[in-house]
Image (cartoon, helix red, strand yellow):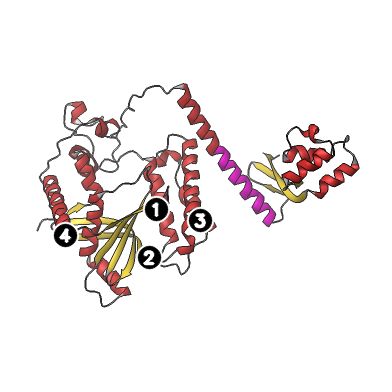
Amino acid sequence: MAKNLSFSYSKMGMYKECPQKYKFRYVHMLPEQPKYYFAFGSAMHAVMEFIFDPARPTFPSLQEALQFFDVTWSKTTFEQKGYASAEKELAGYAEGRQIIESYYAKNASSFVHPLSVEMKSTLDIDGLSLISILDRMDYLGGGKIKILDYKTGKTVQREPDQLYMYQKVVENSPTILKLVQTKDPAVKEVRVEQLSFYHLPTLQEMTFDRAPDKEIFAFWQKVLTIADNIRAGHFDPTPGESQCRWCDYRNLCPVFTGKEYTGPSGYGAKITPPAPAVKEMPSTQEVLSEKIDRYGSLVEELRRLENEIITLMRENKFERHFGKQYKAELERIEKTTFSDKTKVVDLLRNLKLLAKVLVPTQSTVTALLSDPTVSADAKEKLKALAKTCEDFSLHIEKAD
């Protein structure tokens, strides 16, 4: 009896993109170069799995989710993730934290435990060993399931083949049926009621009803045709601008080399990355924009770290603390604010001090309180409109 062909939605997608690429990846088993968008997506999926783990009796706090993300993110270097530089990885890290914070702000009050998260399903059907990872399944009762798939790319759009594949797997999987029966023993069959894509960067959900059986049948015939072509060894390349420009196997492909690849195979095989595609030199405006964005992301990260350090030092009542290379010191400062700008302006006008500040901002008005040319009586009247509170300033320098 022939062994079932290992198959999945991603394998089908690669074969449709280019059969020769499929051959490099799944016949020769040559690894692809790491891609930053895969690393980012994997990290965000791991966080969602952590948040909604059905085995947890309670949901983690925002700080626990952020800490989990930090640990997950730090397990690999920026090169291993596929980022071009440490700065670009830092921007990805900042984006990930921002997504988690926004997700909690919008959804934390309505968290519910799902039926499963990141469930790996293997379904043997029609000569295929169909492997799927279902990001999240919610049980709606009566044997009905909602499938939710997280997306982290720049945009999210309807992907019928992926929806059809999920529906085929869920409605035919004995494992998923048994899982549903742990919640509802009377259920005899599982039916997909809804399929959703959840775009994490925008917190937008796209929901689709169950596909009709006629559409599923037509889709499945396409799947079986692709599987037959793979078994028959049909791996002719389908070159094109979009397929070839960023392909990791370009320097091995017969389209470019003029001969079939006969080099080493296996996941341990070393392949030379293709030469980067020739790109036009960026304009001065593009270079400036990139530097502004990079600087902004670094500033945001520094501010976040500063606030976290100040908070931890205050919680532990530390005035000074040491890292391996640097030391941090907290300076207590008195902060003065004026909340009622109208009253401040009227007072300055009556005291004939308005010309001294030019523009009555918090800092310029506060400066009057230490101005030796301002009378004590005027200072007391200004203080009556002011609020003072304790604030902290952080100083970091090389440890001795």
Q: Earlier in the sequence, mark 4 or mark 3?
A: 3
Q: How crowded is mark 4: few (under 14 residues within 10 Å), some or many (20 or more)?
A: few
Q: How crowded is mark 2: few (under 14 residues within 10 Å), some or many (20 or more)?
A: some
How far apart marks 3 and 2 lie (CA) works out to: 19 Å
Q: In this image, 215 relative to 36: left or right?
A: left
How far apart marks 4 and 1 lie (CA) works out to: 30 Å
Residue at horizontal 42%, vertical 66%? 112
Q: Is residue 325 one of those drawn in magenta?
A: no
Q: Can residue 398 be seen in this view?
A: no
Q: In this image, 55 relative to 61: left or right?
A: left
Q: In this image, 171 relative to 65: left or right?
A: left
Whether residues under marks 4 and 1 lie with C-beta atoms below 8 angstroms apart, the answer is no
Coordinates of residue 167 in the picture (x, y in percent): 23, 59
Which residue range is magenta in the image?
Answer: 298-317
Question: Mainly helix, strand or loop, the magenta region?
Answer: helix
What secondary structure is marked by label 1? Answer: helix
Whether residues under marks 3 and 2 lie with C-beta atoms below 8 angstroms apart, the answer is no
* Dot 4 amino acid type: Asp
Coordinates of residue 286 in the picture (x, y in percent): 45, 26
How far apart marks 2 and 1 lie (CA) works out to: 15 Å
Q: Give the residue number, with chain letter if any, for mark 4.
A: 213
